Image: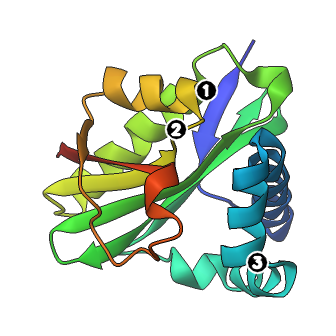
């Protein structure tokens, strides 16, 4: 097994990241009825399509970063960051295809994103996840993230269903 992590190097790589992000959206909608409702409310297809169309700009260097994980050359995971403030980097859309889960891919993605954010001068990384995504919550805790309050404005309907994390860089 050969796992590589790198920013997208070609249009095909960026398309692979987009496909993984769409898989992530479908995964969230399948977790439970509330996640399905929240996904459709906050990321309806037209809005998510626009987000995917501007992914490279939203997460562009030098304040953002996109990683594509490949296992034996096949795209299996992704994650990205963008600046929330001069000292805070937000980690977004950590997703690993089911065929590659349990092999440490997500931990490697998060670790690399944190390392790049640190190199870019950020002092803190933040992220949020669904309360129902227990493996994700355990992963973030194992990587040194601590639960915190919301770090940006979140609609009240979503607050009871999310967990917010932060970690010093």
In the rendered image, the vertical position of residue 113 relative to residue 89, given as above or below: above
Label for residue 109? 2
Residue at screen point 82% across, 70% down: 11
Left or right position of 48 against 139: right
Looking at the image, residue 168 lies above or below residue 145: below
Q: Which mark is residue 105?
A: 1
Give the class, few, some or many, for how many residues have Cα within 10 Å of label 3's Cα (few <14, many ≥20): some
Q: Quadrant of residue 134?
A: top right
Query: In the rendered view, does 125 fall on the left or right side of 107?
Result: left
Residue 55: where, in percent of width, then height?
A: 65, 76
Q: Position of residue 69 (x, y in %)?
A: 67, 39
Dot 1 or dot 3: first in sequence order is 3
Callout 2–callout 1 Cβ contact below 8 Å: yes
Picture quarter with the N terminus: top right
Crowd rating for badge 1 (residues with CA inside 10 Å; few <14, some 14–19, many 20+): many
Q: What residue appears at the point 74 percent right and 35 percent down from the top-left corner?
A: 70
- Residue 130 pos. (x, y %): 55, 46
Q: Is residue 72 visible?
A: no
Measuring from the top left, give residue 113's x and y in whole percent.
41, 48
Q: Name the residue at 51% across, 74% down.
A: 59
């Amino acid at each position: 097994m050969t796992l590589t992590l790198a920013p997208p190097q070609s249009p095909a790589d960026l398309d692979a990241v987009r496909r993984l992000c769409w898989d992530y959206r479908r995964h969230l909608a399948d977790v439970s009825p509330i996640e399905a409702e929240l996904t459709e409310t906050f990321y309806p297809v037209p809005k998510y399509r626009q987000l995917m169309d501007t992914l490279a700009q939203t997460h562009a260097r030098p304040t953002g970063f996109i990683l594509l994980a490949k296992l034996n050359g096949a795209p299996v995971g992704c994650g990205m960051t963008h600046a929330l403030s001069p000292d805070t980097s937000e980690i977004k859309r950590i997703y690993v295809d089911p065929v590659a889960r349990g092999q440490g891919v997500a931990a490697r993605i998060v670790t690399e994103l944190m390392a790049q954010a640190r190199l870019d001068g950020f002092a803190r990384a933040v992220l949020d996840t669904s309360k129902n995504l227990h493996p994700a919550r355990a992963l973030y805790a194992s990587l040194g993230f601590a639960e915190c309050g919301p770090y940006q404005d979140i609609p009240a309907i979503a607050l009871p269903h999310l967990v917010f994390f932060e970690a010093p860089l």
